[in-house]
Amino acid sequence: MKKRAFLTIFLLVLLTGFVIALNCPPSLPKIYSGQAYYKTGILGLGGEELLDNYEYPLRAVMNGEIVGEGTVIGGDYSIKIIPCSGASGEIIFVINGVKADTKGSYEGQDDWGKIEELNLIFSSEPPHEDTCGDNAIQLGEECDGINFGAINSCGDGWTGTISCTSACKISYVNCTYAGCGDTICNNGETCSTCSSDCGACPTGGDTGGGSSDSGGSNKKTTPSSPGNLISTSGDSNKVSELSIDELNEKDGQQKAGITGQSILDFAKSGIGIGAIIFILAAGLVFGAIKFRKKIFPKKDNFVK
């Protein structure tokens, strides 16, 4: 019974990690550290002064999302930048609604595991009071209490409810992947029930569900000439710049089977990373069980 309970709990934890990996594939952190100063005097002309010994919450924001949390104590800080895999952009550092003039950056895999020293300069002294918890979304916060701003759901292809953490960051741990939004038109999806996978429905046309072969898109040969341009997207009003010969060549490449590039692309995707995590964890569980049986054999084996 204890063994079964342990395995059940472990699988639940593993499934939660798998869902999180699908929603936000993990990446390796980039660490920023240094000292934080604020400008003194009128218009900051009085020079720069190190922040006092108060413990300030420091948040890093990239593309409107919190990608790192840390603290500033005695003017010293350290913070890990951990965005979703594949994300990159400019890093904004915020203390209680006050944005630093100094900015950082995260360049995807090029910054994995990098450690960089960077002194932060704030235009004014940040307040001691943490703005997280006042039910108002301030700079450096994704949510606050029950206030989620413009975000009110788990997103396309997901079901469940979002929540707000004590650090004023949106949590998706209660969200479940529903299928729609995986770029594949299948499982009974149609252009009317899942346009993100199956494409937009044509006016007066067939709205039937797609399969993995057709992709659910309504490909139509356009009358435009020269070049015999063909629409390759679900929206028949959008015409790609591909000729019939180029399209045939592309189709032939797609039918060539599994390639090293396709495997690499899958491994970098959210589903791929989640699958890798699941396989590795399952292997560890299986290995642990085999090891335990080897070290602690059943008592029956000693009875003759």
Image (tube, helix red, strand yellow):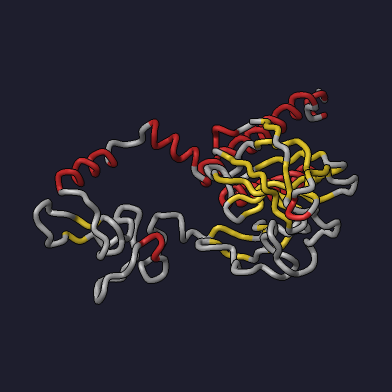
Q: Quadrant of the C terminus?
A: top right
**Residue furthest toward the right?**
53
Judging depth in this view, the residue of 226 and 94 nearest the camera is 94
Please provide percent x and percent y for residue 56.
83, 50
Please provide percent x and percent y for residue 157.
50, 61
149 with respect to 47 (left or right)? left
| Image quadrant in which you'd find residue 265 | top left
Judging depth in this view, the residue of 263 and 35 nearest the camera is 35
- At 76% across and 36% down in the image, what residue appears? 34
Judging depth in this view, the residue of 42 and 165 nearest the camera is 42
Residue 59 seen? yes
236 with respect to 125 (left or right)? left
| Image quadrant in which you'd find residue 26 | top right
Residue 278 seen? no
Asked if 43 appears above or below 14 in the picture, the reply is below
**Residue furthest toward the bottom?**
204
- At 65% across and 49% down in the image, what residue appears? 92
| Image quadrant in which you'd find residue 148 | bottom right
- At 82% across and 29% down in the image, what residue appears? 299
Please provide percent x and percent y for residue 130.
82, 59
Asked if 80 appears above or below 180 in the picture, the reply is above
Judging depth in this view, the residue of 160 and 304 nearest the camera is 160
Please provide percent x and percent y for residue 141.
70, 59
- At 46% across and 59% down in the image, what residue appears? 181
